[in-house]
Amino acid sequence: MKPKLYIETSIVSYLTEKPSADVRVAANRDATIEWWEARAPAFELFVSEFVLVESTLGDSEAADRGLGAIGSIPRLEATEAVRSLGQTLISEGAIPAKAEIDAYHIAIAAVHGMEYLLTWNCTHIANALIRAKIESVCRRHGDEPPTICTPQELMED
């Protein structure tokens, strides 16, 4: 059985973004495309309504490419348990209120039993300084947190 992996919006953005002169952006884009082509088939992929909504923001051509890339991927439901855990991640200080959608990405992955949450959001999600807080809140409320990682961290030799 394949491990379950939740794809956060930043992955979709990098996957469908046009080439960039910014070295960091270009490196993340390349790593995302490499992961998508080489490693994605090894996982059972999931997205959510949060990803779909965020993917439609901004440039309409990029949004169309993003939605096309994830169109056939199953969607996880934003249940009351997801909304509750998302609010708890905020109220207990793991995620700042200004990053509410990030709390919901974590919550939906945890509540639905995802083994991995793949993201480039290193400010509020894949952040070593807050990862322990996220894990603690999830576990205190009965949910096993996913392993939060970037595509670079989920590659094989």
Image (cartoon, helix red, strand yellow):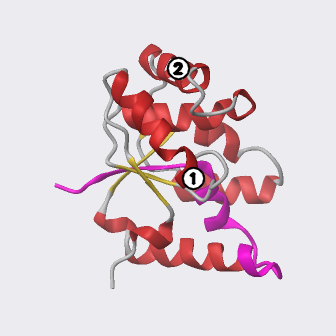
Specify which label sits upstream in the sequence, 1 or 2. 2
Q: Are marks 1 and 2 in contact (CB under 8 Å)?
A: no
Q: Amino acid at mark 2?
A: Thr
Query: Image quadrant of residue 140?
Result: top left
Q: Amino acid at mark 1?
A: Asn
Q: Which corner quadrant holds the N terminus?
A: bottom left
Location of residue 15 in the rendering, given as x and y in whole percent from the top left corner: 61, 67
Over which residues does the magenta segment extend? 1-25
Location of residue 137 in the rendering, given as x and y in whole percent from the top left corner: 44, 28
Frontmost residue, 97 versus 17: 97
Which residue is located at x 31 percent, y 23 percent? 142
Location of residue 45 in the rendering, given as x and y in whole percent from the top left corner: 38, 52
- In the depicted structure, whether residue 49 falls above or below residue 36: above
Residue position for label 2:
88
Mark 1 crowd level (few <14, some 14–19, many ≥20, 10 Å Cα):
some
Q: Which corner quadrant holds the C terminus?
A: bottom left
Determine if residue 138 is in view. Answer: yes
- In the depicted structure, whether residue 67 falls above or below residue 21: above
Which residue is located at x 59 percent, y 42 percent? 51
Frontmost residue, 90 versus 104: 90
Residue position for label 1:
127
- In the depicted structure, whether residue 71 falls above or below residue 27: above
Query: What SS does tag 2 mark?
Result: helix
- In the depicted structure, whether residue 86 falls above or below residue 135: above
Which residue is located at x 75 percent, y 73 percent? 18
